[in-house]
Amino acid sequence: MDSLKNSDPQVYKAIINEIKREKSTINLIASENFAPLPVLQAQGSVMTNKYAEGYPALRWYDGCEYVDVVEQLAIDRAKKLFRAEHVNVQPHSGTQANMAVYFSMLKPGDKVLAMDLACGGHLSHGHRHNFSGKYFKVISYGVSKRDEKIDYNEVEDLAKRHKPKMILVGASAYPRIIDFIKFRKIADKVGAFVLADIAHIAGLVAVGLHPSPIPYAEFVTATTHKTLRGPRSGMVMCRKKFAQAIDSEVFPGIQGGPLMHIIAAKAVALKTALRPQFKTYQKQVVANAKKLASSLSARGYRIVSGGTDNHMLLVDLRSKKITGKDAAFALHNANIVVNKNLIPFDPLSPMLTSGLRLGTPSVTSRGMRENEMAQIACLIDGVISAAKNEKVIKMTAQEVVRLTNKFPVYKELKL
Ligand SMILES: *Cc1c(COP(=O)(O)O)cnc(C)c1O
């Protein structure tokens, strides 16, 4: 990065500081991961220079012969990995992927049934300040008070009552297996489309550790930077008969030129995801989440829904008399990065929250296993139990640096 260092020392310094931050903190943000070096290299390549409006072999401008290669590779690999009939790899993000489905299948004012944000849904599923909530009439389902799992009876009742045109399934903060077959059956009873948003669990779905929605949903959207370990981006998968509608909605409907350097990086990540080692990695992600959950539970923390089936868990902090906001702040000062999160039926506001969401994709990417999860649970408990004790926080921060030094993020870069 010498040329960057010379031409823009301020940006260079911020990047170096970010490298140091990532290296020396324990990252438990469930939606984040470390993209492998080959992904970063493709992402930092000259493919950013090319305008490629259109699709492989059907471009607006000339000179697309090499960007066509990477986009076709990304498409073919995604189809193989997810057994999808059609894939569009151009959405810039998960939100754009969802937008492409909404705008191609619905008219403004149409009804959508989606998961409540307070129970784990995503902004792009109907938040009032998001396009989804502004243009469409969103009805939401939640989880049951009894077991904090999706209440399929409630979903069916709401579907029958409101007759939505589309039912959305998928979440940002739901630690349990989702039964896509049940959603298909409910949708069929009311003649609705199913959009399965697997942004968080795409990596688990890819290797069969979470059931795939592909056979049961007309549309499946994903991000590529969460469990899938690729560049920050999105994609849409759909049945062949919707291919044309989705492709023309992504471009020219909602986007202009695709980010070809990011698509190249998606191709690289998808190749990695097809390797047997990727399944080993995802298994460890889930094993680590289970171990983190059981270790915290053993220390008196209530885990929402009683545990986890995937890469994340929600911790109810009420028994510890601390808000999510204060816990996350103290943990951050101790070099442990998490996010505050609403728990189902949270009595506190989204600014405060009664919970934390913890995820294991990043720590697993750097090689941590069950032993480290038990150690991290102990560190988290120490900080939360003494959130105002600066000495404890400082000592924990030092311990985190010692631990993270043993698990470099980018071995190739000695980082
Ligand atoms: C992360 C996420 C998205 C999209 O996120 P972007 O930040 O737009 O890439 C969409 N849906 C769900 C369920 C998510 O968790």
Image: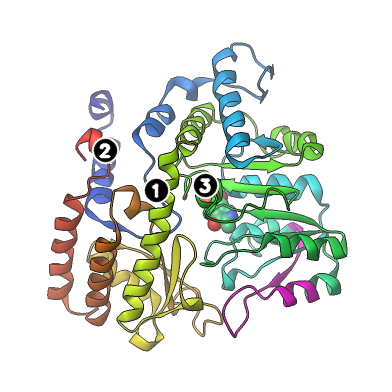
Residue in the picture at 75% in, 34% down:
248
Gap between marks 3 and 2, in whole Å? 41 Å
- Are there few (<14), some (14-19), or many (20+) residues within 10 Å of tag 1? many
Q: Is residue 386 visible?
A: yes
Q: What is the number of the mark on residue 207?
A: 3
Residue position for label 2? 10
Range covered by the magenta-colored residues: 135-157
Gap between marks 2 and 1, in whole Å? 36 Å
Which is in the foreground here, disc 3 or disc 2?
A: 3
- Amino acid type at circle 1 is Tyr
- Are there few (<14), some (14-19), or many (20+) residues within 10 Å of tag 3? many
Q: Is residue 346 magenta?
A: no
Q: Is residue 18 above or below residue 126?
A: above
Tell whether label 1 touches label 3 (CB within 8 Å). no
Residue position for label 1? 281
Q: Earlier in the sequence, mark 3 or mark 2?
A: 2
